[in-house]
Amino acid sequence: MVFVGVHGEWGRIDATRADLGCGQDRESIYKAKPSAPLTCYECDWQLHLVHKTHGAYDLWFLRHANNAPHCEVRLAGEGMAHHLLKLDLAHHVRAAGWSAEYEVAAPDGSWRADVMATSPDGCRRVALEAQMAAIPITDIEARTDRYRTADVEVCWFTDRKTVPWLDSVPSVQIARPDDGGPVQVTAGASRFEPQWCDDRADCGLCECHDCGADVEGNLPCGGHGKWLAASPFALDRFVAAICADTTRPHRLRTEGRRDGGEWRWITRAYFGLEEEQVRATARRHEVIERLAAVQRRRREAGQAAERDHIAAIEALLRRQKALVKPVVDFVFHEAGTYPNVARDGIPEFAMGVPVYVGGKPYAVICPVAGRVPALRDRLAPLILFAASEQERGRIAAQASAGQRIEVLAVEVPPATSAQVPSRRDQREVTVQQMVSRMLGIDRI
């Protein structure tokens, strides 16, 4: 069954219109003898006008005469559900004050609309497609793109239980109630439910977000609203809203949606609510990025300072170790006896290595200049040893006036990677242990 045909004298006719869409009487060709000159616009085969009732529907349509050839229009027009949905769509379009035509084709044949709705001023055209059969997503997306290229809006309608392409193109799912009530739109339309923290400057629901948890500081609320499926509503309301341009197809954009989100039909008010959240989320991300950058720079500066500090300690330990033998020789020649040298530097001697003669402090190897002021009186009677004039200058600037400081020029080995200690050194404290001890991390 089809709705549109060609009359030999009147041209294109619409069987659903009482005047056939051309100002003629439908009864004049119904069961006319001889048959009226009606043919299919696709295959040019003879057509007959048919009248029947189906529930509350008073149906007028065209049927191909017997032995008709293969015809895409005839095949597409098969199925009562498809037939009735096209009738409903055209009826609702006309009730909204627009014109509706069946089987309108592109000049180049790239598309053919089940129902083409056209605004009174001709500025808008909307193809309303009844897609009751299964169709691959790629095919329906390609057909949608062809409409878009032709500047024709489109909405796909289906009554199928499972619709894998419902999210991929502007479309809705419909259902025809068993009690004969109006057709309902059951899926494909959405409403946005906004939700905000009481204090938008300090997001109290940050655990609901997938970002910002590791950033310290107050974060603005990016919004916690979400899209919800609209409750079922009458098809005539939906078609009227399309014609009035109060509902539009829209790709959802809020958090949790993939790039180029699902297609849904929404009202302008819901678009505004979503837009507010999208902008707030963008602001939140900007704050997160800014705070993260500041905190990253602080961490990097702290890590660099710590590396420099450790490097300075390791350099001190190398100088102290290099000076042990020269200091022992120096003290022996001056005091006439071999001194005892501590294993490493200790706080009581400004982290320098104490040297004892006869059980009493005699000298200190490489004390830390910054620790000397607090221990001036303790260090004043002792000899302070330095590995270079530069180090001597640093210590002298902090020590008591007249403090004796001796420079023993030695070759200090460069920093090397950690090595496994030899059997002889296994009882000695490693450089890392000494660094840890000086930092107060590992008291052993």
Image: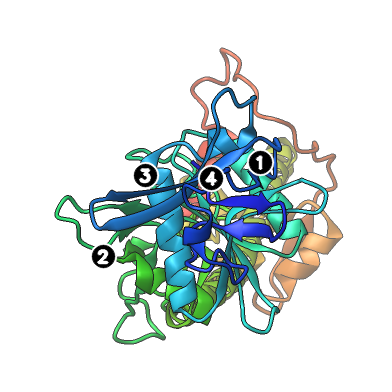
Which mark is in front, 3 or 2? Answer: 3
- The correct choice, above or below, for 243 with respect to 337 in the image is below
Q: In the figure, is residue 409 to the left or right of 76?
A: right
- Residue 336 shows which numbered tag? 1
Secondary structure, mark 2, is: loop
Q: Circles 4 and 2: CB distance less than 8 Å?
A: no
Query: Closer to the camera, 258 or 103?
Result: 103
Quarter of the picture holding the C terminus: top left
Q: Residue at x 64, y 31 (%)?
A: 71
Can you see residue 196?
A: yes
Looking at the image, the residue that sits furthest to the front is: 33
Can you see residue 316?
A: no
Circle 4 residue: 33
Circle 2 residue: 231
The amino acid on which the numbered mark 4 sits, given as a three-letter code, is Lys
**Picture quadrant of residue 286:** bottom right
Closer to the chain start, of discs 2 and 1, is 2
Secondary structure, mark 4, is: loop
